Image: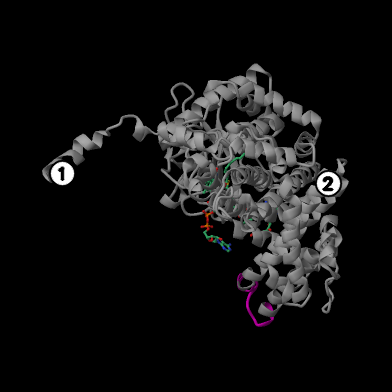
Amino acid sequence: MASPSSDLDRERRKCTFNVAELTDIINGGREKTERRQYLESLVLNEPIFNYDDYYFLSREEKYSDAVKKTVRLVQVLKQHNIEDPEDYQTLLKYVLNLNLPIALHNSMFRPTIRDQGTDEQRKKWLPLANDYKIIGTYAQTELGHGTFIRGLETTSTYDPKREEFVLNTPTLTATKWWPGCLGKTSTHAVVMAQLYIKNQCYGIHSFIIQLRSLKDHSPMPGVTVGDIGNKVGLETNDNGFLAMDNVRIPRENMLMRHAQVYPDGTYRKPANSKLVYGTMVLLRATVVSESATNLSKAATIAIRYSCVRRQTEAKPGELEPQIIDYVTQQHKLVPQLATAYAFAWIARYMMSTYHALHADIESGHLGALQELHGISSGLKAFTAEMSVSGIEVCRRACGGHGFSAASGLVSMYKDRLPSCTYEGENTVLYLQTARFLLKCFRQPSITPSSMSYIQVKPLPGARWGVKSPEDLMKPILLVEAFEHRAQRTIKSAAQFLESQISQGLDTSEAMNRSGIEFVRCAKAHCYYFVTRNFFQSTALLKCSKEIKESLLTLGVVFALNGIADNSGEFLEDCFITGTQMEFVRERILYCYKQLRPNLVGLVDAFAFADQSLNSALGAYDGDVYNRLYNWAKRAPLNKTDVHSSYHKYLKPILKSKI
Ligand SMILES: CCCCCCCC/C=C\CCCC(=O)SCCNC(=O)CCNC(=O)[C@H](O)C(C)(C)COP(=O)(O)OP(=O)(O)OC[C@H]1O[C@@H](n2cnc3c(N)ncnc32)[C@H](O)[C@@H]1OP(=O)(O)O
Ligand SMILES: Cc1cc2nc3c(=O)[nH]c(=O)nc-3n(C[C@H](O)[C@H](O)[C@H](O)COP(=O)(O)OP(=O)(O)OC[C@H]3O[C@@H](n4cnc5c(N)ncnc54)[C@H](O)[C@@H]3O)c2cc1C
């Protein structure tokens, strides 16, 4: 048997490009790489951030361990004056392999105060939050409602006499349920509640509530709070419940940047009622980036392992091939790698679009709200869905060892799975994007330039200009196929809706009946958007010819697999012919062959620290079998040669039989 490490060494020698150059591209430049390395150096050598036995811990131990790590992380950040949120995100993404029990504090609580608080409120709360003197969460979802926010039942009633709001959980279904970090960690929460003034309801607004005493962490009077119990993954997080019984807060605790309640109870409504949903939009954009990072990790583990793992001698006596050399294995893993790169590029686009449109919104250009919502909803759903399914493909591609916790892929899958549900259930978000696409289809004036393609009506007899398999290496033709599919499905969804309305259905029922068409066109739009962005971004890169070639080939794999996996949608209007579909399959194989020498280089370029992968299968040195063996020996069941259950239960029956 060949040595696993020599297998990876050989793979690395075969790589045609400079891996460090690609790492810089992925990170966004040399300076960013150096910053990342500096941040890594601050934590990687600290024993507290060791994850070696993490997979053996119980849920409670995992939570407790995560709190310990969180506190140390906060100390490190303070010690080195690290305040830039980007640095914090870099640490979480590339270095620390866990969901912190302060995730919501940084990803939602602080941003909500920043975006929805007045200048005075920011001045009061942000220094406390930035310094972790208080820890907050975002409590919106209730037992009875998550998707339909307008249906939330928690009430916040203004008492003008005392200039206070009184918060209540009027029914069981009004109990806040699911908010991350709520159960045991947070001292404060932004609570979304229906605002009542003089018996009139003004809809959902945000209020800052103190949940726990800052002296001893016990729940505040009127507050019932706790953990909701075990769920799929996210064991380090204390997703919680919250019920409030006449909890009084000062008037100043309503976040009043957009809507105001004056001392006498006069209400001033926001310029747009959706401004209160802003933090969710930010987090949806963040999910795109998280989906990219995690799929990159999964591809790194599975591809390194597949170069080390050997199985089934082709001819008697010959060395068994590396499993990566089976084309079926390549067909599992190369598309995941291509998707990881496509998502890394779209994540960058999403974040810069978020910042640009958010700045527009801040300066009063509220038209940007629907554009940002339209783009971010679909991309959140699309990337979460493909990333989660891609992680599972990677896990299965590792065979039996993919089933072991030591692979790192089991917990990754479980921790990412909820991203299809939280921050807007995926179907619900696709439907939101579809609404926006249809609006653009009908109203050129509101269509942003990034979506102007929607205005071009697809020609009924349009045919794909691909004449040979070589043509499939041309980005323009690949993008054209996705553009055509998106245009056609948007048009067809609009026609379907109109046909329902013309049959006499009211708008909401017609929309419901059109839902499947809506989701179809939203997915088609997202595939087009991501493919187009991949080729556009890659074309702009200033890099070596070898890197550009590899990236373009990955783009072709992403596009061609998208066509092959959704072939019906391209064939049904005869845009693509059966012969062209054969070209597609042929070219996919060709691309796998082209990429084969560079697969390890392409995953090494993500530059994940071993600690952040926490995988016996995916470590840089490829020493898979020693790692698996040593890890198993440390399993709690192996602490003694004879387990206590032998003495308690097994011994009597074993003896009685002889
Ligand atoms: C390295 C850092 C890592 C950080 C990682 C952190 C990990 C954290 C982990 C988990 C956190 C999870 C947190 C949460 O889950 S918080 C709760 C999230 N909840 C949701 O997302 C709920 C989803 N529901 C909604 O968003 C909405 O209710 C809705 C489905 C969009 C419908 O809203 P509503 O009923 O008010 O609206 P209408 O249907 O009446 O639509 C009216 C028009 O408004 C448009 N609209 C809706 N939302 C928005 C928006 N946000 N912005 C702009 N416009 C919006 C909607 O499309 C309609 O437009 P139209 O033109 O069609 O009339
Ligand atoms: C791990 C995790 C962490 C979370 N963290 C937080 C948090 O920090 N803070 C917070 O406030 N919340 C949080 N949530 C709640 C989360 O945001 C909601 O669960 C999510 O928005 C989905 O809402 P729901 O549970 O009401 O699902 P439902 O809406 O009940 O969805 C069930 C099904 O109904 C369908 N459906 C619902 N409405 C429609 C519709 N209009 N059209 C078509 N189909 C529809 C959905 O597609 C889905 O198939 C978290 C949830 C999870 C799982």
Please identify the quarter of the rendering in which residue 253 is found: top right
| Pick the front one: 573 or 256 | 573
Mark nearer the N terminus (2 vs 1): 2
Please identify the quarter of the rendering in which residue 499 is found: bottom right
Query: Residue 624 at what x, y percent from top left?
Result: 54, 38
Query: Residue 258 at what x, y percent from top left?
Result: 70, 42
- Residue drawn at x 31%, y 29% as measured from the top left: 640
Please say whether residue 508 is one of the residues in the magenta stretch.
yes
Q: What's the mark number on residue 653? A: 1
Check disc 1: other Cα within 10 Å, few if <14, some if 14-19, many if 20+. Answer: few
- The amino acid type of the residue labelled 2 equals Lys
Direction from residue 580 to residue 328 in the image, left or right:
left
* Residue that label 2 marks: 548
Query: Residue 541 at what x, y percent from top left?
Result: 86, 43
Q: What's the mark number on residue 407? A: none
- Whether disc 2's CB lies below 8 Å from ligand 1 is answered no
- Residue drawn at x 70%, y 66% as measured from the top left: 564
Query: What is the C-alpha distance between the residues marked 2 and 1?
Result: 67 Å
- Please report the bounds of the magenta region as a residue range: 501-512
- Residue drawn at x 67%, y 46% as measured from the top left: 292
